[in-house]
Amino acid sequence: MKFLVVDDSPTMRRIVINALKSFGIEDIVEAEDGQDALSKLQTHKIDFVITDWNMPNMSGLDLTKAIRASEQWKNLPILMVTTRGLKEDIIQALQAKVNNYIVKPFTPQVLKEKITAVLKAGEK
């Protein structure tokens, strides 16, 4: 499985990538914002997107909407990892059809559980 990690913070990307590697996931592509992520989606066969919400150029929410609007990627699993923990934010993200949501800060265990939950839900 190839993961796309989208965050404007190199430190946050590193935290997520290190957690993924600790689960045995090695096939990882990085993007620094939603626009970068869309171009990576066109050049790589991505199986799972982990995205931040607040980013310059294109937010994670807009990235999610763009992915869902695409026939090619509409079923791509998307996990949003963000500091935005308000109920309204979570509802807005779910309405945009993210598959799951994590509020920062988080532990690697929570990340693993959410990825597993998204993948299991996709098998149904």
Image (cartoon, helix red, strand yellow):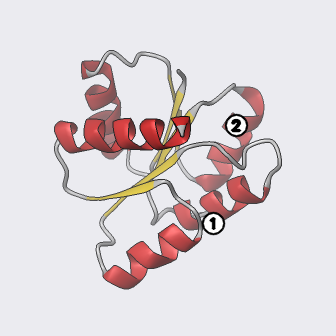
Residue 68 in the image, given as x and y percentages of width and height = 70, 57
- The residue at the point 35 percent across, 30 percent down is 17
The disc label shown at residue 41, or none: 2
Q: Secondary structure at mark 2?
A: helix
Amino acid at dot 2: Leu
Q: Label 1 vs label 2: CA separation?
A: 15 Å
Q: Quadrant of residue 109?
A: top left
Residue 13 at least partly seen: no
Taking 1 as reference, is 114 left or right? left
- The residue at the point 49 percent across, 54 percent down is 99
Amino acid at dot 1: Asp
Taking 108 as reference, is 49 left or right? right
- The residue at the point 56 percent across, 52 percent down is 33
Alpha-carbon neighbours of circle 2 within 10 Å: few (<14), some, or many (≥20)? some
Residue 64 at least partly seen: yes
Viewer-proximal residue among 94 and 67: 94
- Residue, disc 1: 62
Q: Earlier in the sequence, mark 1 or mark 2?
A: 2
